[in-house]
Amino acid sequence: MEEEEENFVLTALFNATEEANIEGIQELLKNVTNFDINQTNKHGESVLHIAASGGHIEIIELLLTKGINLSAKDKHGDSAVFWAARQGQVKVIEYLKSQDVSLDTQNKSGEAPIHVAARYGHTHVVEYLAAAGADINIQDKLGETSLHNAAWHGVPQLCMVLCAAGADMDRKTQEEETPLHCAASRGNLECVKVLVDSGARLDLTDKRGCTALHMACRRHHINIALTLIHGGASLDMQDIGGETPLHPAAKEGLLPIVQTMCAFGCKVDLCNKGSGTALHLASRSGHIEVVRCLMLAGADSDRPNKDGITGEIMALAQGHTDIATLLARMKPDFKEGYISQLCPTKIPLGRIKLKIFGHSNVGKTTLIESLKCGYISGFFRKSSWTRASGNSMPSNNNLTTKEKGAENGIHRHNSLPSQLSFDVLNSNYTKGIDVQHISLTGAGDFTVWEFSGYEPYYMMYDHFIGDSNCIHFVLFNLDEPIEVQRAQSMYWLHFIRSRVPPHEPIGQFGTISNKAHVILVATHADKVGCSRNIRGEFVSNDASLIHSEAVQQFGADFEICDQVFVVDSNVATSAEMKALKNKLAVIKTQIVKTLPTVNGFLDAAVVQLHAWCKETAFFPVMPWHDFAEQIRSKVNPLASDDHLREIVQNLQLMGEVIYIEGEIDQDLVVVNPQWLCTEILGQLLSHEKIMQSRVTGCFTADDFQLMFPEVEATDMLTVLEALEICTQCENDGDIEYEFPCLNFIETLHGLWDKDVRTLPNPVYGGVRVQALAGMSNQMVHIFPRLQIHLRRMLIQEGPETESDLYQWYHGTKYCTANLECLLTMEMSDQAIEIKVRGPDTNASHAFYLLDEMSTLTEHILNEMCPGMLYEKHYLSPLQLKEHKRKPHSYTPHDLIAKQLENYTKLSLPDTEITEELKDVLCYGSTDIQSNVTMGVDLHVSHLSLNTRREFSKLLDRPDPMGRDWCLLAVKLDLADTLPSLDAPGRNQIQSRTDKTLEEWARDHDNTIGKLLFKLKDLGRQDAVDIVTKTMPPMKVFPPEGAVSPDEGVDTEHNGEATSEVPSNNSSTTLSR
């Protein structure tokens, strides 16, 4: 009975202690007599352990007055210090130490409190114990220290604290493992980094002779292995089985580790106790890329193991015939040549691309012919041109430009067309893109890409523009009025700028890091009587004015040559032509310094490419996998995947191939760019084919076979589908190929008429996407690509879909269930308008359909024109419902202004009618409004790269009143960071304005709305305008955990703002 009473008291004490009920404990102890305060439960736990675990120092002090034993242990040998350490109660440990309780007492496992604290990741406890004099190197019965525990459990901060406190980083356990072994085997990379940086010995071995590097390789911890290798770990230490770290890495196919070891000079032919080399293990396991790497590092392919078996035989035995074939080709005479081919050199790339742009009749082809001429051929060219000029009809010389065009039956534009023109301005116009290799005296080799001035080709040019590692010529005709010269040259500069993807970091004044090189060339100098300078070169005031404007407007986008070249394109030996060639040589030298050097592999591949062009003249296209295997078969079997990626990049930089991204594992390599750009695309979109083509733009494979009889139609259509020029569609059960660029069906009347029978109470919504004011017309070239994606979207819905799609020239109608969507080109083909309507009971579905369509449009825009700024206007629902011919559109500036002012109403111009903001943006639905984020509430990181560039252009420049980036930083409460924002250093080329935004964006509460208020307070309305014009008025986010239908697609307005920037040397970019 007495024992039960004591157990009852003990349980009550435990409960009161857990609840920190000190009054209850006092009352309980007061009313109980003859109770042993040190009594424990069946686990040996006393009330002291519970109090220490809970951090109740007041209770411990009370217990001490009652005679508690502060050093008492439970049945595991854990004292109160252990219990406090396990729960991170550092104050309790401090108190116990003040009462002379040992901090190094060990439990039955030999662990001390510091082991427990380390295992549970309590850094502050370990810091205190180390500072208080606890033995940080004390070992438990397994020989483990607290550093072993921290490394094993992956607590890098603890590792750092213990190393700084003097922990023995090389102490071994009973298994002779160091903390580095523990971290490496467990895959704790950050702990490994701490130990390596703190000076841990990397080559200590355990009982099996394994180093930490062995363990990392055996457990597939690639990043840890690389860290150890770069930290200086021995690569050739052998374990008790004779294996070096290379053996398990080769066996497991860990290519990055094998590559790094070979690069660091490991011994590739060391044998294990079975006489097996790394090559044997890789061959048996089927890792061909590892085999290539080992052979390139000098591995002996003929070396047998103890059973006399070579790697080749091992591979055959396991069915790896590709490896066996590779090793069979590694005869000594050939092997050295293969290796030599792949060795890097210091030889720069010998050829780059020269791209030439300009409207028809500016003289692009003539200029190229003159550039190709040497001194002798140039002399004869000049003589023949002089004779031809002298024999021309004198009566025609006095005709005006317009009269000449009329006489020849050719329409000529005296200004930029606002709509797509199919007129031919020159009967001998270039078809598509003419690609040819030329060698210029004094400048070396170039691949010239002459882009036709015939407008229907423009929609496919984005596939071939974007690489900044080339030179761009922009030609304009001095024989045109100055307004036409200016308009045409600015058009092409806008065109190129829009298609070059800007890369970070943003430099001062909004400059990009991948500025393309541009040379302005003014032609027909002989026709307008240009004077010459002291060097004998033509000069023109009009050309100089255009050059100055180009530098001012596009200086942040291009490296524009400091000289405009005024030429007579027919005279190959003129002073200005020589100066142009000299400038090409200078710029080419600048570019190739930044590019990879060449080797024998590239030279051999170029020779093989030319042979393939002859063998496959009618279809010089290979799937990427076939291209890779052919290169290995015909050129070098040791070429790794990395070598192939590098060589295809160099071939694209040279203009030798075109790389086309297809579906997954269906990328294509065109080994003859002239064939694709001129013979196929040039013919398909030529004036002659357009005049003859079917008005629907739909063709069967048989129809296409008749158009291009020398090419297998299905193969050719695969290429055109990859270029998104056509797509498959079904017509009455037959497979056809739809070419929106050849669709000339006229708009059917009544497609968008009111229909009160099917839609008695409709709701309307719409958006208009257009280029920012001042930018040249680009939207007309985007719409056919949008129609391709719309057709594919319908096909992806499956054969059972109830949706329907009807497309015509510059228009599409999509219907699904009881919703209708209309997409059209408007505003003289300078804007894409999207309208969606449906019953009022289905407003939410109408909203999400509109969002899906506008998101798709913006995605295509960002893909085709990544450097272009555009605006997204919202159409008046009221006027859409009334079927106004030109419904009013609310600009993003209007919508953001209302959001900033917390106004919910919008006024229609010239009326007294108002509309609700939620009607314009959210189809009048409060539920929808609650599921979207208004533009002003978006985090500042949602500002696009293009918007931030324009923003930096404004605020990087010194302001007369000091209202620049510096004052903005002060307004944003970043005054303390000004020294770092302005300090030169690693990021000194970065825009100070952009650095300010980057710093301010670290706070998740900083929104675009807050930024706009600060800018208004700063008095920089110009900066407010650029932000409000180009930011999204709202954004739809999927519910947390939901998968967006557009997941994986960059749908950010005006491009995603991200620190991850795609490489300018990616395969698809370089084809541009």
Image (cartoon, grey):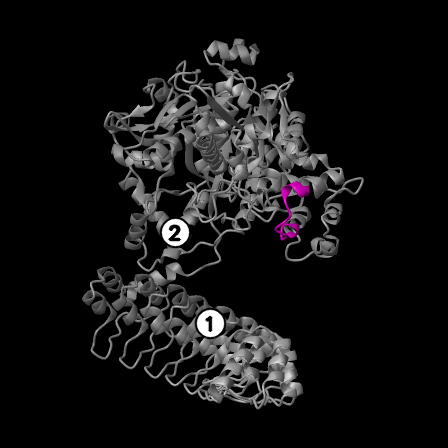
The span picked out in magenta is 999-1011
The disc placed on residue 873 is: none
Q: Amino acid at mark 2?
A: Asp
1031 shown above or below 47? above
| Mark 2 neighbour density, 10 Å: few (under 14) some (14–19) many (20 or more) | some
Q: Is residue 957 on the magenta stretch?
A: no
Find disc 1 in the rendering and name its residue: 229
Marks 1 and 2, how far apart at CA: 33 Å
264 shown above or below 1057? below
Q: Nearer the viewer, residue 582 or 193?
A: 193
Q: Secondary structure at mark 2?
A: helix
Q: Amino acid at mark 1?
A: Ile
| Mark 1 neighbour density, 10 Å: few (under 14) some (14–19) many (20 or more) | some
| x 40%, y 52%: residue | 645
Q: Point out residue 343 in the picture as x, y percentages from the top left corner.
A: 41, 61
**Residue at far right of view:** 961
282 shown above or below 505? below
The image quadrant that residue 691 belongs to is top left
Find disc 2 in the rendering and name its residue: 603
Q: Secondary structure at mark 1?
A: helix
